[in-house]
Image: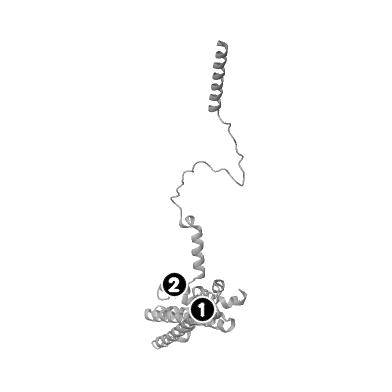
């Protein structure tokens, strides 16, 4: 009887010991192979890094690209137009002398330009001719858009943005034919007004000024100075793009 009790106590002790070991045993560490396609995520977050001296281009490169595209497709032609009333006297004088033909005496012209009243008169005349040529270029450009209606029928439907960009129409694409007519009329009236202003200004010329030579110099100066403006405004015709090819 005592033997049985002793065996029972031993068995109970053994079971308790096994249960204790089973309860508190350490689980084996399982390793997981890192896949190139599915890296293991860290169980913690990395501390944020602050960049204090980033430029605008570093902070938002996509926004910069967008702005560049906006500038490219919405060029303001007046940014390419020189204001001869605001440039320095020295600079304007250099531009005049550089625009003379070989048959003109530059020394005599330089002496003439030393006269303050004559110099101011020629400066004002140059600006008037500058505005005249600009209004002429704009009128020709909007007349070109109007002509597209007869050749391509662009007003039968909405113009695509690609076509508008290719033809320098910028923000006017898809608008009504009336807008084109209004712009065309606007620059036609400006041209006529500028021409009248030039005629009135030339009536005030002094007798000692050879207006034929002065006008030739002025036209040469503006023709060279408006080169990039002409390219920008005449780009659609130079590319000879057709709406049907877009």
Image position of 111 (left or right of 1): left
**Is the C terminus in the top left, top right, bottom left or bottom right quadrant?**
bottom right
Q: Earlier in the sequence, mark 1 or mark 2?
A: 2
Q: Residues within 10 Å of mark 1 (few under 14, many from 20)?
A: some
Q: What label does residue 70 carry, if any?
A: none
Distance between the Cα atoms at labels 1 and 2? Answer: 17 Å
Q: Quadrant of residue 12?
A: top right
- Residue at position x 39%, y 79% from top? 120
Residue 150 appears at what percent x and percent y?
57, 84
Identify which residue, 7 or 142, lies in the foreground. 7
- Residue at position x 44%, y 75% from top? 93
Identify which residue, 21 or 180, lies in the foreground. 21
Secondary structure of the residue carrying tag 1 is: helix
The coloring applied to the image is one colour
Secondary structure of the residue carrying tag 2 is: helix
Residue reaching furthest to the front:
1
Residue 142 appears at what percent x and percent y?
51, 81
Residue reaching furthest to the left:
117
Image position of 22 (left or right of 48): right
- Residue at position x 56%, y 23% from top? 18
Residue reaching furthest to the top:
2
The answer to whether residue 217 is visible is: no
Residue 108 appears at what percent x and percent y?
45, 80
Q: What label does residue 223 carry, if any?
A: 1
Q: Check disc 2 and report the residue beneath it.
A: 91
Residue 244 appears at what percent x and percent y?
61, 77
Identify which residue, 30 or 17, lies in the foreground. 17
Q: Quadrant of residue 124?
A: bottom left
């Amino acid at each position: 009887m005592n033997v049985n009790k002793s065996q029972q106590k031993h068995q109970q002790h053994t079971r308790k010991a096994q249960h204790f070991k089973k309860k508190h045993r350490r689980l084996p560490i399982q390793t997981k192979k890192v896949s190139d396609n599915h890296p293991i995520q860290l169980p913690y977050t990395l501390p944020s890094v602050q960049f204090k001296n980033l430029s605008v281009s570093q902070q938002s490169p996509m926004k910069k690209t967008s702005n560049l595209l906006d500038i490219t497709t919405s060029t303001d032609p007046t940014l390419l137009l020189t204001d001869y009333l605001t440039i320095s006297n020295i600079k304007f004088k250099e531009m005049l002398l550089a625009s003379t033909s070989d048959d003109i005496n530059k020394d005599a012209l330089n002496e003439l330009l030393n006269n303050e009243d004559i110099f101011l008169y020629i400066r004002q005349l140059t600006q008037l001719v500058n505005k005249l040529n600009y209004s002429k270029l704009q009128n020709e450009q909007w007349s070109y858009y109007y002509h597209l209606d007869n050749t391509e029928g662009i007003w039968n439907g909405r113009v695509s943005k690609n076509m508008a960009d290719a033809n320098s129409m910028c923000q006017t694409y898809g608008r009504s034919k009336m807008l084109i007519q209004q712009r065309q009329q606007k620059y036609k009236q400006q041209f006529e007004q500028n021409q009248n202003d030039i005629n009135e200004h030339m009536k005030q010329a002094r007798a000692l000024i050879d207006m034929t030579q002065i006008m030739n110099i002025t036209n040469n100066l503006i023709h060279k100075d408006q080169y990039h403006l002409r390219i920008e405004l005449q780009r659609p015709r130079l590319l000879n793009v057709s709406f049907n090819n877009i």
